[in-house]
Amino acid sequence: MTTAFDPIDLSGTQLANRIAMAPMTRSRAHGPGLTPTDSVVEYYAQRASAGLIITEGIQPSVIGQGYPNTPGLHSREQVAAWREVTDAVHAKGGRIFAQLMHAGRIGHPVIWPDQELVSVAPSAVTPAGQLFTGEGLQDFVPPRELSGDEVRATIGEYVDAARNAIEAGFDGVELHGANGYLIHQFLSTNTNRRTDEWGGSVENRIRFAVEVTRAVADAIGAGRTGLRISPGNTYNDIAETDTEATYTALVGALEPLGLGYLHVVEMVPGHRELTLALRKASTSTFILNPFTDGPTGPDALALVEDGVADIVAYGALFLANPDLPARLAAGGPYNTPDTATFFGGDDKGYIDYPALTN
């Protein structure tokens, strides 16, 4: 019987186990030009016993930034700083993918160096709610609809960032198609109201996700490319009216590419049937961040044994337990995540969680 502690070949990248560290925004890119600092290097190196680390969302362009102090991969300084992170993880035997995240309409001028910039989106639909910025909560601002040429240019930004990731030493990249950010905005019926080739029908609404993924796979290799999706997720004012049809079509269109993995985030109770259908439709390695009432816990290990997933992803539990695979193997104990230090701040709640051997 396969267990979560067994190794796995991820399209040529050898993983020591089937326990992934899920991508988690930490807002601690305090270096010049939104670069990772020594603390970021330490944070990821501490967690190198994960079979696979997937980084926090990294913006592929200036306008792709959605939150304060999140890192980028669009400048030479950022590439050099990320190289220190990947070198540290590899020195400890770990594997690490960069998550490329364009926030789209989720963002605010106060966080950008040029406050005359306007966020971009599939359609000019302002999200409900507010965004946390360095100056407190701010109402979202109306986004600007991308022209057809700009859609193609944005795909190019993902490709450039993916190439930068490989230059920075990452083992691959994950495209963030979940949680209400740009790729998800194209998939969703309430954020994509276009009538051109990028909107309207299911086939057109999945086009951006498919074209971005294909372009990145062509640039760096399909085996080094993954996609994260969250079917039915309403985060960031998303509303989907045809979830099953959309994601079934998306996974079907991606299947010929031979991606390294598909990463599904279950955000909705009762979506396990859809999860299983997507797993069956994809021959790529299947990573699952399962739906739970709280943080993903030890019970999720059984998903690998039962064949529901090839790899299970842990978020908050990995944040608080840098040696999580060892703790899961030992049956605990587990540090408790400090929610007050999740986003922004200093090293407290970031690199000071003790390991079992401390």
Image (spheres, rainbow, N blue to C red):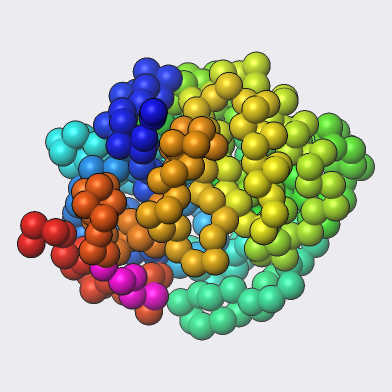
Q: Position of residue 68 (x, y in %)?
A: 45, 67
Relative vertical location of residue 161 with respect to residue 218 in this rendering, above or below: below
Q: Is residue 336 magenta?
A: yes
Range covered by the magenta-colored residues:
335-339
Q: Residue furthest front?
A: 1
Q: Percent position (x, y) of residue 356?
A: 14, 59
Q: Quadrant of residue 250?
A: top right
Q: Quadrant of the N terminus?
A: top left
- Regarding residue 114, the answer to whether it shows in the image is no
Q: Quadrant of residue 274?
A: top right
Side of 249 relative to 258 (left or right)? right
Viewer-nearest residue: 324 or 93: 324
Horizontal side, residue 22 vs residue 282: left or right? left
Residue 89, picture quadrant = top left
Residue at x 19% of width, y 34% of height: 93
- Given residues 265 and 138, the one toward you in this image is 265
Question: 338 left or right of 85?
Answer: right
* Dominant secondary structure, magenta: loop
Q: Residue at 36% of width from left, 38% of height from top? A: 4
Please tell me whether residue 330 is drawn above or below residue 160 in the rendered image. Answer: below
Q: Where is 313 relative to 252, above or below? A: below
Identified at 27% across, 64% down, the residue is 334
Q: Position of residue 110 (x, y in %)?
A: 54, 72
- Residue 132, compared with residue 298, is above or below; it is below
Relative image position of residue 275 (x, y in whole percent) = 65, 41
Q: For residue 314: magenta?
A: no
Q: Can residue 311 be seen by looking at this rendering?
A: yes
The quadrant of the rendering that contains the C terminus is bottom left
